[in-house]
Amino acid sequence: MTVHFKQDEPDNSNRLDRMKQGVLGKPLPRIEGLAKVTGTAPYAAEYPIENCTEGVLVTATITRGEVTSIDHESVLTMPGVIAVVDNEKLCTRAAQGTANEAPMQGPKQVCYWGQPIALVVAETFEQARDAAKHLKVDYREEEGAPIDPGAVEPEEQEDETVHQGDLAHAMADAAHSVDVTYTTRGHASAAMEPHAAIAQWDGDKLTVYAALQMLNYNITELADALDMEEENIRLISRFVGGGFGSKLGISEEVVAAALAAKQIGRPVRVVQSRQQVFQTVMRRSETTQRLRLAADENGKLTGFGHEALVSNLPGEDFAEPVLQSSHFLYDGENRELMLKVARIHRMTAGSVRAPGEAVGMPALEGAMDVLAEKAGLDPVELRLRNIPEKDPEEDLPFSSHKLAECLKQGAEAFGWDKGPRKPRQRREGEWWIGTGMASAARVHNIAEAKARVTLKADGTALVETDMTDIGTGTYTILAQIVGEMLGLDPERVLVELGDTRHPRGPGSGGSWGAASIGSAVYVACKAIREELAAKTGTSEEELELREGEAGTGEALTDLLEGEDLAREGHYEPGDIEDDYTASGFGAFFAEVRVNHYTGETRVDRMLGAFGFGRVLNAKTARSQCIGGITWSIGVALTEALEFDPRDGHLVNCDLAEYHVPVHRDVPDLEVVLVEERDGAASPIQAKGIGELGMCGGAAAIANAIYNACGARIYDYPMTPDRVLEAMPE
Amino acid sequence: MRPFQYTRAPSLTEASNLTAGEDALAIAGGTNLLDLMKLQVETPGQLADINRLGFADIEATDDGGLRLGALATNTDTAVHPRVRSDYPVLSRAILAGATQQLRNKATNGGNLCQRTRCFYFTNIDQPCNKREPGSGCGAIDGIAKLHAILGTSNQCIATYPGDMAVALSALGAAVEISGEKGERSVPVRDFHLLPGDTPWIENVLEAGEIITGIVLPAPVGGTQIYRKVRERSSYAFALVSVAAIIELADGKFSRADLAFGGLAHKPWFDPRIGECLLGQPPSAALFEKAADILLEDARGYGENDFKIPLTRRTLHAVLAQVTGDAA
């Protein structure tokens, strides 16, 4: 039985706070943690499938043009080689997140260097890999494909454009103004688990084990790519070794494995090499961003301008949503916002770790630091003076707003010295030392979700949904929600995820997973509680459940009388999405040291204070924040995709040369959870966490670099060469 | 798969015979070779496993120096009490490279022979004169941030990526080599070669020659520093590195052995730098003069232009650190 709840109104009933089990929000360790660290949690490529063959993708070595011929015979005589698959249904790009349709297909047309054009299948992986390197491919190359985003006329994304008032006038009249241009480089998701799929056919039924974040969309994408009915497809993705956006949509190996398995009549496994994952899945676009801030003599913003240039391949809808939080974060009645996309022939740009704010906020918050200096204001104070009462563009109330609290509590916990600041005040040996801060903001997303909860006759519970856990703690928080609602120790709750046989969840992405699927589980539990209340002769509101017993003293097992009690919860966000501007907010504080001689920057300590609604598990929430802050260290100091200026190929395509922060780059990170209840965000009053932790953090580091050594840098990442160039003598 | 013959060499003579062929390579730790084989950058037909040949010991030499077996791991070498006490620059250099897991597996001989991490060398679908003579250099006019500024040629601007050899160069160590023609000893400073017109020839090893050990001279004392400048604080190759053994007597440099990494196709040792410093009291002007000598012929390739001022500043930092910020 399905219970549908469409949320049109905020739910401020705080029901979860009045449950009796007392387990929600507790810092429980992850349920699947032991299985993962002992190697017993199977990832996509690890399922033992009988008679399985191995496929390796062949990728293009031209930037743009046509594959004129593929000489199958060139490899079919090699040992172990079974087939070459160059079916027109092969995908040449990964699907964008929530695309819900097949990504670009047709491997004959080449749009970027490294694009998959065929799959070679062999008995062993080594045979397939060698054959893939020897496959003879002829091309007709189209010269002159643009690969430099600055060299083409960009397209305006009109739905992002805001012209409000007269910014030029406000800038001219401003007591203090800032007009600066920041750049950020491309980023990779750099998940540990490479993209992988095993496809197996049974008649016209297809099962695919894959590394995916959003099975509810992925099944539609795969069905569309293969021209099949969804009911004939089963996708399994129980454990995912990190996604960070790169596994939102299906990518090339999923469709290739399915087509190959059909062609040869045996199961096929396709694991992308590390280099292929870097070069064929998704990049975050580089950005160029102009920030204009106009303020009166008190530092109150009168004008706000943010224009950004990003890039993508022709035919892609996705444009890095750089301005996402700029629309509402600060006041300023005269506003000018614009996003443009340059069509170039580098690999696909798509969602990578907090698309939008991950790069938009570091630019905006860098510019705010410049303004604070010009206005002679403490940077915390400048931000406090510019928190809007309501969304400055949409005339909507905020669902909740904890920026001021985060700024204050963060400053207090960090030991922030209030007042105007001057650079180059502290030096220890070779090192300049300084501090910086920035606001955090990340839009709150929520999605439709379904989950089945079964209270078993034996007093245990089962949760089933195709929702994924990409390492964030979904298994654990769902057990906690059920435990809280039904009065069970979470150890008595079995959670089954990542299988499209189960009701459709929202998928993991955009930080919406916990709030969305948590709400579906909440709706299901509430329906079960109603049944139990009826059995005990009380109301659902008054029903108390704890440790497998009702408040009236009856054991759940007695109430159930040998019958399982199952409900499918169907949560759907309704008017709340349109009636409120919802966002997570926070504040970052960083202390860094910059080497006077070498320009090397090291983060000595960093703190983030975040408000994102209800905390479902203090440990996994904190871990998400720590992960986010770590990403922001990467954005600030080390991460940059390098593209060859001639053929546009991604050059630094492994974890040795694409520099995510290493342990030594990450100091002790402090997280302050500023708890709140946001009933307009979701029925469980929670908002997204995962991405907020990186949205702005890079600017706290950049601003600290300036405070330390006087180098004001407008280009991320702030590598030693850039620091030295900007360092005053 | 790409078939190759794997043979466990039972003796040094046999290892020499096995690796004398044109497409034969020796394998020890394999931390670099196996990666390159997976990418088909290296495609040996014959692999001679030399791990069972012994020479993994670290032992004193008659003149008070230390002999590092070629098959001793980087980890065992870095933590060896005598290396730590008498040759700290070597210990520090090794620990500045790679990761603990890689160092546990990597051997001293293999470390000397590791190949460049140039992006165009490791991608077989891109031009590289080192990998495929005559195909061109992708890095010139390409992505060259990590590339060389000294001793380059129009054929190749790759760097030698290692740290250990930079310290060995400063220490004046020698490489012991065994081959069909017998044994020979080559100073580390002469072991690696500049690219010239033959960038695929990276060191003096001839076909069939095996490194058996590295001999460190008797300890020289002094202050020993290994300074590695990099974009993240571990598991990154040097933008520039400096191995320095410095001593002052009566306020003047009495020893100044310096070698540099990240600048060239080999660890860079320029005897003129020591000559410039010896007998002189430390001063900012002197450090600048040393840097002028070092960088006299330096040439940037756009993206790596910054290495020229960075090297100057890093040399300055190292000398200032040893001489107590005299400048």
Image (spheres, rainbow, N blue to C red):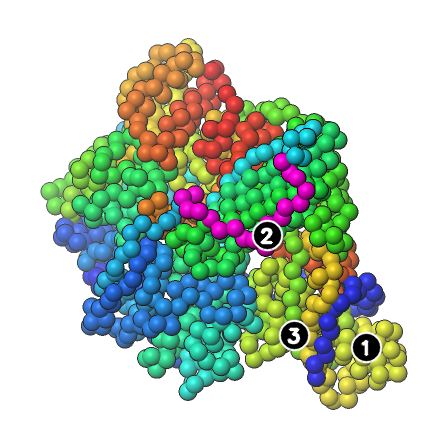
Q: Can you tell which mark lies on residue A450?
A: 3
Residue at screen point 47% across, 48% down: A154
- Mark 1 or mark 3: whose residue is earlier in sequence: 3
Within 10 Å of disc 1 (Cα), the crowding (few <14, some 14-19, many 20+) is: some
Left or right: A352 in relation to B122: right
Q: Quadrant of the N terminus of chain B?
A: bottom left
**Residue A59: mark:** none
Range of the magenta residues? A150-168
The residue wearing badge 2 is A160
User: Helix or strand or loop: what does disc 3 sit on?
Assistant: strand
Mark 2 in CB contact with mark 3 (< 8 angstroms): no
Q: Chain of mark 3?
A: A
Q: Badge 2 sits on which subunit?
A: A
Q: Earlier in the sequence, mark 2 or mark 3?
A: 2
Residue A686, image x, y percentages: 72, 60
Of A395 and B10, nearer the camera is A395
Judge depth for marks 2 and 1 and give the one in front.
Answer: 2
Vertical relation: A52 (above or below) A289 = below
Disc 1, SS: strand
Q: Vertical placement of A573 versus A229: above or below? A: above
Given the image, on which type of amino acid does mark 2 rest?
Glu
Within the magenta stretch, is there residue A558?
no
Q: Which residue is mark 1?
A: A549
